[in-house]
């Protein structure tokens, strides 16, 4: 919201608010209390200190309809979710993320995908049964309903790569089909791996960084060995549907992967893309891929705070109960007696099967 709107809602002058924002004047306790009530925020929200990580560039997977105003809101909410996950993950004792250095694999997203599949316990042609859980087992937090106000707004995925943060988070800001969700989460995960030294935000979906992230996501979900065995130049559009059903990756992504691997020609790729559009599959592909729900954040909250985890976490971390409830799908409502299902990342790293 604008500075004028905020000043009006907390009943102060805009000039006074401006001085507060610039650090010229302190925030009176009465104003903090008023803002807490007005916006449903815990008092502790106003005591949170910014960190260097908050200034690192954000990476988005977005469409052409994405607006700058939405981007600001999504970025702000991402900061809150990332801080929540970072805090409770560390307090829970779960292992930090130990992500590979792309330079160890010649900066090749295909090679990085092969290495991470191997670390996840997947054989060369195994499907990824649950991409969300796979990322969580690598110590990457996942939130899939970051901002209900942005649904349909064009911002699908968001991450903030940083060498300062060993407990990173990937988030989905938009409601997307299961196959798109899986690809987007892995896409953002690659940014966490390969783009930890970004000098500035990625501004184009055609940038080398975005192309590499898409390549990694496709390679992780659909190994090249499978593409070469099941796809051919003559395979018709409907012939891609069984592959989607088996590997949980959209037809459009399979076609692109086949083109990138040289299994189909550019001409065939263009023909299939036209057919895909004419069939209406750009927005509504056949074969539903099951939705995936994150667990790690809710499990960490339960482990740290036990009973009444949402209320206690809200006070301790300075995040609204509404956000925590949405980001954990209510799993943080469980009591401490339900701790038997918590994933112990330290015992599964490097050998788990997704």
Image (cartoon, rainbow, N blue to C red):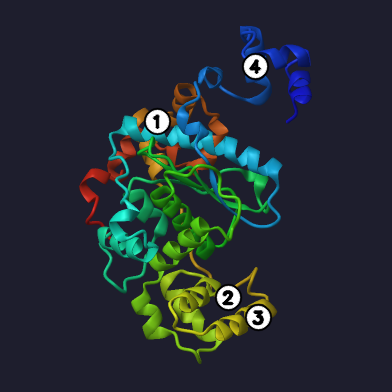
> N-terminal of the two: label 4 or label 1?
4
Residue annotated with mark 1:
87
> N-terminal of the two: label 3 or label 2?
3
Check whether the beta carbons of the residues at disc 4 and disc 3 lie within 8 A of each other: no
Separation of marks 4 and 3 at Cα, in angstroms: 53 Å
Separation of marks 2 and 4 at Cα, in angstroms: 53 Å
Residue annotated with mark 2:
286
Separation of marks 4 and 1 at Cα, in angstroms: 27 Å
Q: Nearer the viewer, residue 161 or 277?
A: 161
The label shown at residue 105 is: none
Q: Quadrant of residue 62?
A: bottom right
- Residue at 26% over, 63% down: 118
Separation of marks 1 and 2 at Cα, in angstroms: 40 Å
Q: Secondary structure at mark 4?
A: loop
In front of the other: label 1 or label 2? Answer: 1
> N-terminal of the two: label 2 or label 4?
4
Q: Is residue 334 in view? A: yes
Check whether the beta carbons of the residues at disc 4 and disc 1 lie within 8 A of each other: no
**Residue 94: x, y in percent?**
29, 38
Q: Secondary structure at mark 1?
A: helix
For this view, does 12 lie left or right of residue 182? right
Estimate how packed mark 3 is, as few (under 14), some (14 to 19) or many (20 or more) residues with alpha carbons within 10 Å: few
Residue annotated with mark 4:
22
Estimate how packed mark 2 is, as few (under 14), some (14 to 19) or many (20 or more) residues with alpha carbons within 10 Å: some
Separation of marks 3 and 2 at Cα, in angstroms: 16 Å
Check whether the beta carbons of the residues at disc 1 and disc 3 lie within 8 A of each other: no
Q: Quadrant of the N terminus?
A: top right
- Residue at 77% over, 16% down: 14
> N-terminal of the two: label 1 or label 3?
1
């Amino acid at each position: 919201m604008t500075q004028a709107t905020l000043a009006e809602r907390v009943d102060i002058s805009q000039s006074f608010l401006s001085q507060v924002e610039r650090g010229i004047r302190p925030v009176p306790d009465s104003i903090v209390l008023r803002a807490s009530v007005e916006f449903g925020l815990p008092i502790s929200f106003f005591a949170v200190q910014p960190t260097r990580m908050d200034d690192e560039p954000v990476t988005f997977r977005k469409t052409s309809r994405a607006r700058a105003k939405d981007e600001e809101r999504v970025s702000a909410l991402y900061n809150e979710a990332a801080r929540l996950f970072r805090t409770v993950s560390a307090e829970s004792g779960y292992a930090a993320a130990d992500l590979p250095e792309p330079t160890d694999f010649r900066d090749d997203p295909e090679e990085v995908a092969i290495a991470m599949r191997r670390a996840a316990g997947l054989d060369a042609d195994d499907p990824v049964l649950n991409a969300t859980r796979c990322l969580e087992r690598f110590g990457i937090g996942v939130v899939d309903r970051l901002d209900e106000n942005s649904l349909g707004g064009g911002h699908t995925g968001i991450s903030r790569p940083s060498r300062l943060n060993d407990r990173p988070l990937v988030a989905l800001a938009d409601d997307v089909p299961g196959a798109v969700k899986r690809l987007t989460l892995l896409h953002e995960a690659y940014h966490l791996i390969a783009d930890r030294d970004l000098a500035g935000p990625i501004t184009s979906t055609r940038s080398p960084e975005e192309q590499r992230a898409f390549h990694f996501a496709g390679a992780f979900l659909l190994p090249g060995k499978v593409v070469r065995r099941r796809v051919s130049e003559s395979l018709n559009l409907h012939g891609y549907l069984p592959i989607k059903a088996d590997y949980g990756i959209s037809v459009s992504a399979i076609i692109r992967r086949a083109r990138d691997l040289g299994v189909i020609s550019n001409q065939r790729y263009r023909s299939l893309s036209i057919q895909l559009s004419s069939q209406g599959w750009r927005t509504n592909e056949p074969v539903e891929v099951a939705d995936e729900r994150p667990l790690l954040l809710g499990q960490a909250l339960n482990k740290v705070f036990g009973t009444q985890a949402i209320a206690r976490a809200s006070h301790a971390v300075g995040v609204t109960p509404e956000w925590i409830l949405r980001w954990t799908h209510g799993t943080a409502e469980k009591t401490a007696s339900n701790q038997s299902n918590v994933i112990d990342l330290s015992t599964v790293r490097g050998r788990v099967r997704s």
